[in-house]
Amino acid sequence: MANNTLGYMIIDGSEIMIRGAALVTDTKGFPLDFTRTDPLRPDQLARILYGESFGKYAKEKLILESLIDAVETDPQVWICSDHDILSPLREKSRIKTVLLEESPHVPLDAAGHIETTADPGVFLIQANANGAPMRAEFPSGVRPDEIQQTAALLTEAAATMDILEPFTRLEKALNFLATGVR
Amino acid sequence: MGLRDFFARRIKRHVDVYRIDDFTLEKPEVKKAVSRPDAINIKPSIEIKASRPFNFADIHENTKCSAVKFNFSEKSVNANNYRIKHYVKEDIKTHKYQIAKKIRTWSMLKQMQALPQERGNILKYVRKRPEVSKGEMILACYGPIVEGAVLKLALNKQHGTLLVWYKGGSRQLKAKNVYLIRRLGLGEKPEWRWL
């Protein structure tokens, strides 16, 4: 359990500017690795050439690959909050990957409990005893045993940290770097 | 018919017939009015193979991303009515355009380690609330927090959240919840309690 690490991947941006950051923490949420990219500002020609596909290309090919290559401490599971990078993150990193979000559901029976939903590949995971279950989405084609292993890792980590909290820190850090305001 | 003709028809049973050799009316001039417009074949050499209209979104959704190159000319050639008006004699130079393959990354671990973690009040989710003495009331609960690794705690009164700084390198992993408990009575201050 002491060696468990969680990785958080965030890619944030618009047509004007895209940037990304990766944070790897221990199970206390303490940072072990933090990597961020330079902001990518596409010029007018790039926007014309790539059109609507620019965002997808920039996220997958430029930002995500650069971050995966730069991270020195590989986590046991990558956690993201953006559906666009869920499958590419799994394919490129070859590490367990899950998209986690808060859910409005009432708490499940006990910590570690998993419940299927109507959406394929989407589960409710009660990682922490005190709180609502998280909505967990897995890339298509992931084996059931990998889902179980990921849920077990999250449940273990949730005993000592708030699983979704590092996203808030990542957003604050990126916002601080962009604007200088905490 | 005149009177002579009347009697001729009744009595003689015949009618004088006059022949007119020269037909005085002019024959109408007949002209061929077949029109042969200059026809231009504008049939395009396009063959429709798709069963439904082309949709850019199909490409957007199904195409895998890859590094794409784009060449463009340095000088433009003016064209008017499809005839080249101005022709650039020398070879047209082309430039390759490509978005950077890799983005520069920065490691900023120390700055990130200095940021506190933020815990929200989870009191409404706590299933088994700890027992408190008479005259005490639980105001808030924050957790899970590894007590042995805490460097500093601070309450964000504006948002009602608890800011947690951990010591780097701590191997403590026993987490607890910290409760904010208020003692009822004048002059009593709220108290933090690990339970």
Image (spheres, rainbow, N blue to C red):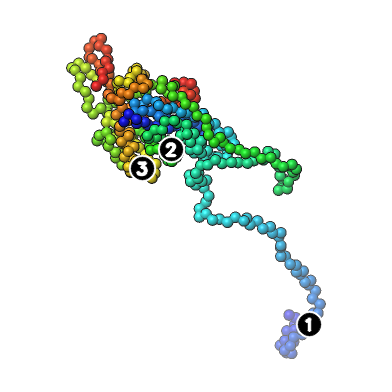
Q: Mark 3: which amino acid?
A: Gly
Q: Position of residue A85 (x, y in %)?
A: 44, 37
1 and 3 marks in contact (CB < 8 Å): no
Q: Nearer the viewer, residue B11 or B128?
A: B128
Q: Which mark is residue A93?
A: 2
Please name the residue shown 62% across and 55% down the image: B44
In this view, which residue lies farthest toward the right?
B22
Which residue in the protein does label 3 denote? Answer: A121
Tag 2 or tag 3, which sits nearer the N-term? 2
* Chain that bears disc 2: A
Q: Position of residue A11 (x, y in %)?
A: 46, 32
Tell me the element at label 1: loop
**How far apart in space, not on screen, are marks 3 and 2 (Cα)?**
19 Å
Q: Position of residue B114 (x, y in %)?
A: 41, 20
Which residue in the protein does label 1 denote? Answer: B18
Numbered disc total: 3
Q: Residues within 10 Å of mark 1 (few under 14, many from 20)?
A: few
Q: Nearer the viewer, mark 3 or mark 2?
A: 2
Q: Residues within 10 Å of mark 2 (few under 14, many from 20)?
A: some
Q: Mark 2: which amino acid?
A: Ser
Displayed quadrant of residue B3: bottom right
* Chain that bears disc 1: B
* Chain that bears disc 3: A
